[in-house]
Amino acid sequence: MSDRFTITLPVAEYAPAHFRLAVDGKVATVTLDRPERKNPLTFESYAELRDLFHALRHEEAVKAVVVTGAGGNFCSGGDVFEIIQPLLERDMAGLLDFTRMTGDLVKAMRACPQPIVAAVDGVCAGAGAIVAMASDLRIGTQDAKVAFLFNRVGLAGCDMGACAILPRIVGQGRASELLYTGRAMTGEEAERWGFFNRLAAPDAVLDEARALAGDLADGPTFANAMTKRMLHMEWDMGVDQAIEAEALAQSVCMQTEDYRRAFDAFAAKRRPAFEGN
């Protein structure tokens, strides 16, 4: 389970064994594809997703990523019989090996430079809610049901970074409620609380996520990657330290060709065509 898969670069040529992957131009779409079970994760799909996002750190052609689920649901979390039941037979070392591996998926999602847009419909529970949480942006539907239901199976809410990341999205009090009770947020509630950036119709949510990812992929992608990195790094900084870090980051971005392209376009009264360098 802990062994790394070999991810072929370029990513467009990689054929995953445990989910679908499609690359259209500069946007990669990852589709969790076990619709008959509401797209649960297995040991193997956790690891392969981790390795894909790790590989994306070195992928230059893909500039944005969409994550979604097949058949009207996002992801129902860890498969009861393929993950939860086998874990009952593991010793402490084996359990820690698993929990560190699942956490490595979130680390890989946060470390890859591409913005990740989650398109969420239907069930989005457990580890599925974590995958949506670990994305940079989330478009949901009225029918979405987002639940961090770890306490429902006798576990703590502190799973895969939830206690660190979720309060920064919805606030400490709301995150506490969700993690203590395991109850589901409705789509409207998730938007109102800031978990979803916006809502879309179920038949349009994937298209809207891809359109948003496409806009990001056509933007100044070096600068977008810097924004993502600084959003992550500044969690552990004081204000003065963050201001200095941003001064350094912005001075780097000011040396890019995209910065000059933006000025030239403004001077010529036309829209800039960014190239990500």
Image: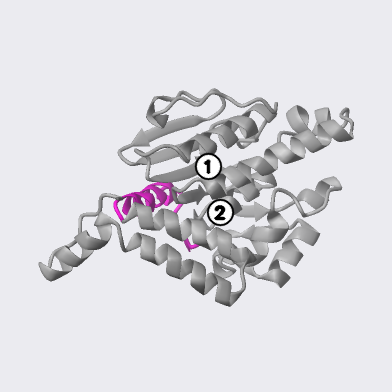
User: Residue visible at 70% across and 37% down?
Assistant: 101
> Over which residues does the magenta segment extend?
196-219
Q: Which residue is mark 2?
A: 143
Question: Up-down: is 209 above or below 20?
Answer: below
The x and y percentages for residue 191 are 54, 65
Q: Is residue 146 magenta?
A: no
User: Residue visible at 76% across and 56% down?
Assistant: 182
Mark 2: secondary structure: loop
- Residue 175, by quadrant, is bottom right
Mark 2 neighbour density, 10 Å: few (under 14) some (14–19) many (20 or more): some
User: Residue visible at 38% across and 47% down?
Assistant: 210
Question: Do the CB atoms of the residues marked 2 and 1 lie less than 8 Å apart?
Answer: yes
Question: Up-down: is 49 above or below 183?
Answer: above
Judged left or right of residue 265, residue 2 is: right
Judged left or right of residue 151, residue 173 is: left
Mark 1 neighbour density, 10 Å: few (under 14) some (14–19) many (20 or more): some
| Dot placed on the residue nearer the N-terminal end, 2 or 1 | 1
